[in-house]
Amino acid sequence: MKLAAKQRNAFSLALDATAAGQATLDVDIKGPSGLALARHYAFDVKAATQVLARRSIRTLAKGESLTLTSDMFSDLVPGTGSVSVSASLSTALDAATILKALDRYPYGCSEQITSRAMPLLYVNELAAGAHLAMDTEVDQRIRDAIERLLARQGSNGSFGLWSAGGDDAWLDAYVTDFLTRAREKGFAVPDVLFKNALDRIRNSVVNGNEPEKDGGRDLAYGLYVLARNGAAPIGDLRYLADTKLNNLATPIAKSQLAAALALVGDRNRAERVYGAALDSLAPKPVLEFGRTDYGSQLRDAAALVSLASEGNAPKATLTQAVSRVETARGLTPYTSTQENAWLVLAARALAKENLSIEVDGQPVKTALYRSYKADMLSGKPLKITNTGDAPVQAVVSVSGSPVTPEPAASNGFKIERSYYTLDGKPADISKVKQNQRFAVVLKITEAKPEYGHIMVSDYLPAGLEIDNPKLVSSGDSGTLDWIEDGEEPEDTEFRDDRFTAAVDRASDSKSVFTVAYVVRAVSPGKYVLPQAYVEDMYNPSRYGRTGTGTVEVRAAK
């Protein structure tokens, strides 16, 4: 475009996104007397569809090969595809797939921050550190997690799920377990804050109920963390093992007690309690609802594998525990962050297996855990061959955003998204004018309410932005007081690309609840309206999603 002296001009430039990633726009201006100006603008382009993962299992007999090619990503939005491959003796402990799932998990309560960071402490033991295809270095992620968790610590040493301080002794133990392991690996955790966390656990152990009253979940984990720090009361451990073992309500609690006994050198009792933990894992597990310790049969079985390996339990115990993991993993294709964290820790127990594999002709003598982005396989297929005598279980997980969006679905939850003017009149969002504002109302129906930590998320079309975070359905401002069944979330986030609300539910909660926020139309153009989504974060087989749509924002005249 050429401008004469004192001439002004304005024009619109249409941008069409063809792939996800970072796009750039360069502007060069040249004028008289050698005038030269250059501007560089970067745009983050995101897919409008939810990330999906396709997991497949293949047994490689002696001499058999598996080839990974770029064809696996043909139905995914360019720039979003990746593949994780694990080759080991287990079909359930596919650490590469699990680490990738943790890496892309979008939410950030204290449990989730911990669950994403804990496995990263051990990626080198999995021979996976150089092959995770992550965007930032592992050590920095761990340091960031430590900083975020310590910001959630209250003055009494406790940790809140979404904010500073709380009243969840199991969460306190879990976070402090991670901080303990991080210190063992050489990461800096301030002494005063760490001491406060340990003191909190010590007080919880001293003042806790007897196991027959509450199942001893918090007590067992607290004792394990104290034992890991050389501060466990040995008499209490032996008392529980000898007189209260049957009152411990969960397999993970028994596993933690056994690991604590192993740490203090009481091997005989430890082996007996490990055996009790194994016996309490059902050979034919079922999906559980409403556990207050973020757990499941799969999580507990994986924890037993990890803690039994850590405590040098008999090999037979470890082998049978791995079998329990395999069975529980088959219950559902969905796993929580808690399950994934302990599955990776369990994979460490098998990481030193003696295998014989070749990757593009290069020998590998241990279990294989690697991830690759789609462009790494462009024109360069990867061949994995079993060169040993024993069969090898290869688990391949392809993930990315599909070109064709998934249809609306309801599995335990139904979510409906509606748009209104700010005074409560229904609005058509498909064609709007620049600067118009709307209330987005997300109505969730749970036919049979269950205890759970629920996350509601709504991703924004690129032409809209969240307008005033204070205008929500909790009724604080009164502006949206026409909304029915408004729920006060435990936490809300108003980001550039999405709105999220964390809601705690109980079995006696109302079947219907709503959350809402306000958006403004800002950028003229045609956009995809992404799906809204609801899930039980610790039982992700329970979820719901809306369909997609379109939004056209017209320029204000």
Image (cartoon, rainbow, N blue to C red):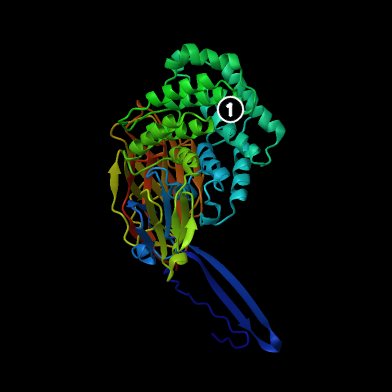
Can you give x and y, in whole percent of width and height, for residue 460 in the image? 43, 55
Task: Write down the quadrant of residue 334 in the picture.
Answer: top left
Q: Is 166 left or right of 504, judged from the image as shown?
A: right
The 10 Å Cα crowd at callout 1, few under 14, some 14 to 19, many 20 or more, is many
Task: Write down the quadrant of residue 287 in the picture.
Answer: top left
Judge whether 282 appears above or below 20 on screen.
above
Identify the residue position indicated by label 1 in the image.
225
Can you give x and y, in whole percent of width and height, for residue 470 in the image? 51, 43
Residue in the picture at 33% in, 63% down: 75
Judge whether 114 appears above or below 224 on screen.
below
Residue closer to the observer: 167 or 439: 167
Judge whether 273 appears above or below 150 on screen.
above
Residue in the picture at 59% in, 43% down: 145
Find the residue positioned furthest to the front: 389
Q: Is 112 left or right of 182, judged from the image as shown?
A: left
Tell me how many marks there are: 1
Image quadrant where one finds the N terminus? bottom right
Q: Is residue 332 visible?
A: yes
Image quadrant where one finds the C terminus? bottom left
Q: Is residue 437 visible?
A: no
Can you give x and y, in whole percent of width and height, for residue 537 in the image? 42, 39
Find the residue positioned furthest to the top: 243
Q: Amino acid at mark 1?
A: Val
What SS does tag 1 mark?
helix
Task: Write down the quadrant of residue 91 in the picture.
Answer: top left
Can you give x and y, in whole percent of width and height, for residue 351 in the image? 49, 44
Residue in the picture at 56% in, 29% down: 172
